[in-house]
Amino acid sequence: MSAIEKIFTSAPGRAVASKAGLKDPPQLRRGRTWPQGAIVLADLNGSTVGRETLVLLGRSFDSPIIDSEDGDAPGYGAKIGAIVVDATTLTTIADLEKMRAVLRPAVRALEGSGRVVILARPAAGDWEQRSVTRALDGINRTVAKELRKGATSTLLYVDHDATPSDLLSTMGFALQGRSAFVDGQTWQVSAADTNVNQLHDTPLDGRTIVVTGAARGIGAAIARSLAQAGAHILAIDIPPAGEALAEVANEIGGTALQLDITADDAGTKIADHIAFRGLKLYGIVHNAGITRDKMLVNTDKARWDSVLDVNLAAQMRINEVLLARRGDGGIEDGGRIIGVASTSGLAGNKGQTNYAASKAGVAGLVQAMAPDLADRAITVNAVAPGFIETEMTGKIPFVQREIFRRSNSLSQGGQPIDVAETIGYFLDPASQGVNGQVVRVCGQNLVGA
Amino acid sequence: MRPKLGGCLIIVNTKTLESVPGMGAGFARALIPSRASQARMPQHDLRVADVKQDVGRLADYCRVTGFTLRNHVPPTWLHVLTFPLQVHLLGDKDASVRLAGAIHVSNTMTLHRPVSSQDVLELGVGTTDLRPHRKGALVDLTSRVRVDGEVAWEGVSTYLAQGMSTPGEVEERERTPFTPVTPQARWRLSASLGREYRRVSGDPNPIHTSRIAARGFGFPRPIIHGMWTHARALAALEGQLTDSYTAQVDFLKPIFLPGTVGMVSQRNAEGINVDVTDKRGEKAHLRMQVRPHG
Amino acid sequence: MTHNAVIVGGNRIPFTKAGGRYADASNHDLLTAALDGLVARFGLSGQRLGEVAGGAVLKHPRDFNLTREAVLSSALSPDTPACDLQQACGTSLETTVYIANKIALGQIESGIACGVDSASDAPITVSDGLKKALLKASRARSVGERAKAFAAIRPRHLAPLAPGVAEPRTGLSMGEHQALTTEAWGVTREEQDEIAAASHHNLAAAWDDGFFDDLVTPYLGVARDTILRPDTSVEKLARLKPAFGGPEGTMTAGNSTALSDGAASVFLASESYARENKLPMLARVVDAEVAAVDHPGGADLLLGPVAAAGRLLERQGLTLDDFALIEIHEAFASTVAATLKAWNDEDFCRARGLSGPIGTFDHSKLNVAGSSLAAGHPFAATGARIVPTLAKLLHAKGPGSRGLISMCAAGGQGIVAIVEAV
């Protein structure tokens, strides 16, 4: 521990830090929990998809308070849990004022870990309409930064043909505590003939899912969380990590497979294992990853190659095998592929050229694969974790770590479970309409795009 | 249920020790009962970095307490590792609360993530929350174990310094009353158990090993270390424990050596409750609640 | 009614030299680790199995119910029953046969056969203090360190009674017995060193191929067998001094097994259970035979399995040609060499009551993934090391491929089994 860390974590250090504005961060609402206060629905211009989705979710909702054009802003009188703004019919710049009018009172009344969820259409139409679509993104990002006490804001672009069934799992995720560390993000929900009419607590019942790098850290959290959602987990890690891997597998009633994912036959071994066990493979979570951090000027070929191979090339090779072996230990139609990218990849990070390349590559890979696999109803998505409290981040020097940890809209590092919950949302059979998306789990990192 | 840490506003600083303190002057002083009437604790934290675990001693510890030697170590073992720092703090010249005469009344430990016997640890101990009690003053010794900078384990040991005073209001804590049970297990504690546990824990308090010392503190016979009973109770749940949980223990009545006690465990929606009772299950010696996380 | 008993798979922990990385672990700890790895490999957490049979040769009185206690510490359902069996070095091949027989008879549907031994935690009837000092001394790198370790010994540590390492009826150690056999059969130093070198090379190659990725789970940070010397050679082995058979002896520390710590397990099930539970089936247990010789009467102590092999082959109507792979436990390299000679010795075989010599076979089929000389030999764990290894090798060769296992055991005994790939 560095001298600075000692001062910082000591009581006087904390007292000083507190005066300097570094307050103890808010405790986030997590898990399959709904906001405590009322959910307010603002369906602007008579939009209906938001209303119908809330009905399908079985959530009651209140009418919004609209800010008057002049004079004092009216208040809600009590804390509200969330505001869902259905802006799917907003088309003009003049319409944007309606966003201000519903958000102003709502943001003021929002409870800790409350939610702002904005629904909009993907960019289409005339110049003005497209501009408005992008304007909503600016509103979302800014509201997210202004919200306090762990409240978050999310913008969802909902396809014209997407039904409330298609939107159900996404809206549920955005409102529930599962999205605790997802803030200021924007992603898209498409039409997908999703045939569901309610959220399930164990949506993965009876489904077999592979998690790589499952022996510890985020991988172990993912395995645990997916097992709680009903999945049978095939937990994979390198043979030397076998003991910790076995402990994870036994705790969750899963199966351990000791395997080096960079081996040429890794995909075949996974498929063989699944086929040998008479299982059907529903999904794979490519979590295994390494860092070999150095400034680019000090990065040799070995550091470069190992990171690119483990973090990117290996999962591409494995995907190819698992997609080719449909019905024989490969991924079944209707299945799921999840990549783990990183905000380092999306925004860049000093000392991590190799890592950033691999992780941005993962984002590119899922976006490339998604349309090609649509005819098999396989979705491909990625999470991009920001600062998550793990052993790997524990190795970052203290000052840098404390800056990273605090440099987001929620003033804290995320937990491995936050990454796991987002992955669980992608894996949910009800998330069929979510494809080719990269969702950051970063508490809205201040750094980067 | 999570231990409260770092709540105090006293100005303290941190002393970093080169290594885990041995049986030095601090230990000796910690064993001398204090005559002070006002409870005082040193206002600094102690830290030791780069602590490698001795697997041989861990194996002995597991043998004495009933754990199986695995890659993941028992959380009570991490308490044992931080214990010399607690003693060092209690042996400080600024401390009027001493190990001898202080009664360990409760303990809460949280395992945030599994710790491997191969992990290199950073140990930290500090005090918070000196507060009054009907019979004296309560002091919390807080301990932390970090692995690679990440807090893997936290513990709060609450000691009662009998007859001492400290400013503040006595806070009455509500306890669920104990109702007699039929023990599921009976543990026979041998006369040498105190010495065996001293060997693996390094806890030198003679009331656990010497009849004369025990009499000096008003006990007819030596009593077993509360942390042995805690560890033994946790070991009895082997196989039911998850990777992350909080174990809260109240030490209610001392257990004399040699002796026979009963044990009963019960699983409910929140976790597992264990009572270590007298032979017949009529009185509780120790009550433990284990609550898994996430 | 009989059912096919199939080998689903296995798990062991890496084996280490006694006094090494597992020096402080007990039989209970080692066996629990082996079981937990097996449970994880096959997703058995919380499941009740028919029975677990295990054993140890060197056993503390406190371990009277060793296997059941390990089951309780493992992730298996506490409703899984267990028993302890012991047949010296044949223990976990015997437990394999025991579980397979119960499955064949329809008494159970699934079970685990296992074995464990810790030569570090041997029940020496001296104090822990002495044991520790001795272990420390044996690990010492310098004279000074060693002297310091011995200086820690106190008179009170010196309670009497070492354990019985010799055959009770002859007073000879196993190595001394084998030295007699080595000389009687004219086994040369070169033959022995070649067998030892091959064992290390084969085991090293199997590790490098990832062969053990689904057969071994690390324990206490040990991820590979520590006795293994991939770079050993006949030349290097030739430099070692004799350990048994006097100054002219040919048996060295290099061609004899080291005292080892470790545990191993085999998961067995009925074919129907395996199918219902979507478990892999590597090979079925076909048949087994045990035999013993009158070693107090002068017979070769470690050639007990010859009669067992002959009787088993005759009963099954098989010859050595019918086997794709053969495993002969390497108690000593010269045990393997003498066994091969004895199999082909008409007089010896007839004297054992067989109708003729068992014969010879292509030695490239022998111990192809290494054996006890390289892996180590925690006595009761060796059978359960061999069975899954062989089953996996046979499975890769294709259905119907047969394998033969021959193991010698103390008391002039031997156990032999046939498995066949499914």
Image: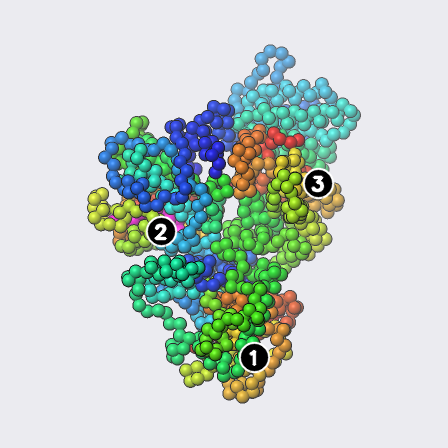
Residue A225 sits above or below residue C124 on the image: above
Q: Which chain carries label 1?
A: C
**Magenta-colored span:** B222-236
Q: Do the residues labelled 3 and 2 touch (CB within 8 Å)?
A: no
Q: Is residue B231 magenta?
A: yes
Position above or below: B244 against A280: above
Check whether the beta carbons of the residues at disc 1 and disc 3 lie within 8 A of each other.
Answer: no
Image point 51% across, 30% down: which residue?
A26
**Neighbour tally class for label 1: few under 14, some 14-19, many 20 plus, Cα within 10 Å:** some
Q: Same chain for marks 1 and 3?
A: no
Name the amino acid type tagged 2. Val
* Residue position for label 2: B200
State which mark lies toward you, 3 or 2: 2
Assess whether residue C80 is covered by the magenta stretch: no
Q: Alpha carbon of mark 1 to alpha carbon of mark 3: how far? A: 61 Å
In whole angstroms, how far apart are the C-alphas of marks 2 and 1? 51 Å
Q: Are marks 2 and 1 in contact (CB under 8 Å)?
A: no
- Residue B47 at x, y percent in the picture: 41, 39
Q: Could you tell me the amino acid type at mark 1?
A: Leu
In percent of the image, x 36 and y 54: which residue is there?
B64
Image coords of residue C9 (percent x, y): 56, 63
The residue where tag 3 is placed is A364
Q: Residue C340 carries which label?
A: 1
